[in-house]
Amino acid sequence: MKAYFIRRFMLVPITLLGVTMIVFALTRFMPGSPMERAMQRATQSEENTKSSGGNESQGGLTDDQLEELEEEYGYDKSIPVAYLQWLGLIPRERQISKSDITKQEEDVIGAAVITDPENETLVVLKGDGRQVKVNKNKPEDAIFVETGKKVSDSEWTVRIDSPDDRAKRWARRNKGDVSEAPPTSYRAVVYKKRFSGLLQGDLGRSSTFQDKVSDMILARVPIAVYFGLLSTIIIYSICIPLGIVKAIKHRTFLDNSSSVLVFVGYSIPGFALGAILLVYLGARLGQFPLFGLMSPNAEDLSFWGKVKDLAHHTVLPLSCYIVGGFAYTTMMMKNNLMDNLAADYVRTAVAKGVSFRRAVFKHAFRNSFIPIATSLGGLITIFVGGSMLVETVFDIQGFGLLQFQAIMNRDQSVIMGTLTIAAFLMIVGNILSDIIVAMIDPRIKFH
């Protein structure tokens, strides 16, 4: 069995590679890339500027700005290269600084005299401020103007983009638009190489909020864990005893009435129930808050005041979280226990003098709990997955709402980050389910 689980864990990274590779490729083809959305925002800004009588040029994006967006989100690379950069297996180009190599009439910034101005240019390094003199024919001999030292001896790298290279990128970026002429000059590019991807804990930056994806996820996970733990504790602490009682009191008034309530709750979607509760208990009666997890003035409350305020905000969304899980767990517990109570080994135990109570809890319950145990590993996904619909209704900034916002905004960095975590937890949860079942039922052996 040990070898089986070792093999399962070894397949985790391979499975993740397959899932993330497919989704990464799909995100590159779906509409609404960061460049397209930036152009839409620029167009809207330009229209607003025109309507207000301002300068029309303020709303547009230059070709250099679009090129920077390409470089930031990896659209200047092929899909395999961009995916390997996202993984952190290939270094990215960071702090990119550029300058066109054009004829210069004089040295306007006080640098050394340029002997061949048509082949040389000065590049001001971003985030550094130093100036680099680059020769088109000998980029490896580029030097820092201030010190005269070679750039190749530092952490910076120099390359020359030819007019053909720039024209290809321009054509791909503009999708064959011939209204403007492509660039025709050489360009000196100075940058730093840095490994920054999934393996380094860097999931990129959100194109919508401009925040680091890892920080956004870490801020949302506690909320998902909070609701996941509460809903799991409530569902299992109520449904398992209720299922046992229903199996023992089969076809009684208690069994029939509880079944009606359980299935009515199961038939109502959580988000629909949330909308009803918000309208009647929140808006009309004013008994519960309408959104969020804390009041605006929560920082001014005492510790117990904050706890009370959190509990007050939790009641409605938690009710929507747990309403759908009652029927499945309760009826599975009841049906499994009834099957085991009718089994020969239980009847034999009762015939030998074992009390009915002991036969139920000592013999039948353990076997009845095995099918439910198969779903325990999957609870780990609930802890961070949340419910995007419930969180949307109550405006709770949880992990589920983050996934929903990422899809609606075509935020590819956030989509990849949340997908990676969700897929990893789902795979690990399936393995944990097998481990739990093997621990509960000694008859099961994995090979």
Image: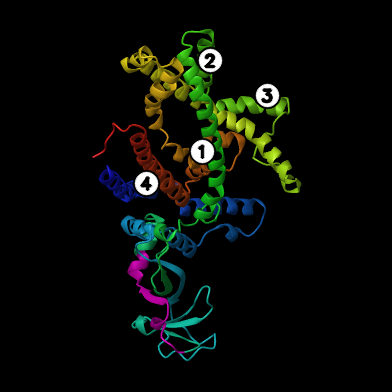
Packing grade of label 2 (10 A; few <14, some 14-19, many >=20) is some
Q: Nearer the viewer, mark 3 or mark 2?
A: 2
Packing grade of label 1 (10 A; few <14, some 14-19, many >=20) is many
Where is 249 relative to 40, above or below? above
Residue visible at 60% across and 27% down? 275
Residue 252 visible in rendering: yes
Q: Position of residue 423 (x, y in %)?
A: 39, 44
* Residue, disc 4: 23
Residue 206 visible in rendering: no
Q: Amino acid at mark 3?
A: Tyr
**Among the two numbered marks 2 and 1 on one chain, the one whose residue lies closer to the N terminus:** 2
For the residues labelled 4 and 1, the Cα–Cα distance comes to: 21 Å
Residues at discs 4 and 1 in contact (Cβ within 8 Å): no
Q: Residue furthest top?
A: 252
Residues at discs 2 and 4 in contact (Cβ within 8 Å): no
Q: Quadrant of residue 293?
A: top right
* Residue, disc 2: 258
**Among the two numbered marks 4 and 3 on one chain, the one whose residue lies closer to the N terminus:** 4
Is 272 positioned to the left or the right of 250 in the image? right
Q: Amino acid at mark 1?
A: Gly
* Residue, disc 3: 280
Q: Position of residue 28 (x, y in %)?
A: 38, 50
State yes or no: residue 156 in magenta.
Answer: yes
Quarter of the figure that contains the C terminus: top left
How was the colour assigned to the protein in this rendering?
A: rainbow
**Among the two numbered marks 1 and 3 on one chain, the one whose residue lies closer to the N terminus:** 3
Residue visible at 53% across and 8% down? 253
* Residue, disc 1: 386
Identify the magenta region. Answer: 148-167
For the residues labelled 2 and 4, the Cα–Cα distance comes to: 43 Å
Q: Nearer the viewer, mark 4 or mark 1?
A: 1
For the residues labelled 4 and 3, the Cα–Cα distance comes to: 41 Å
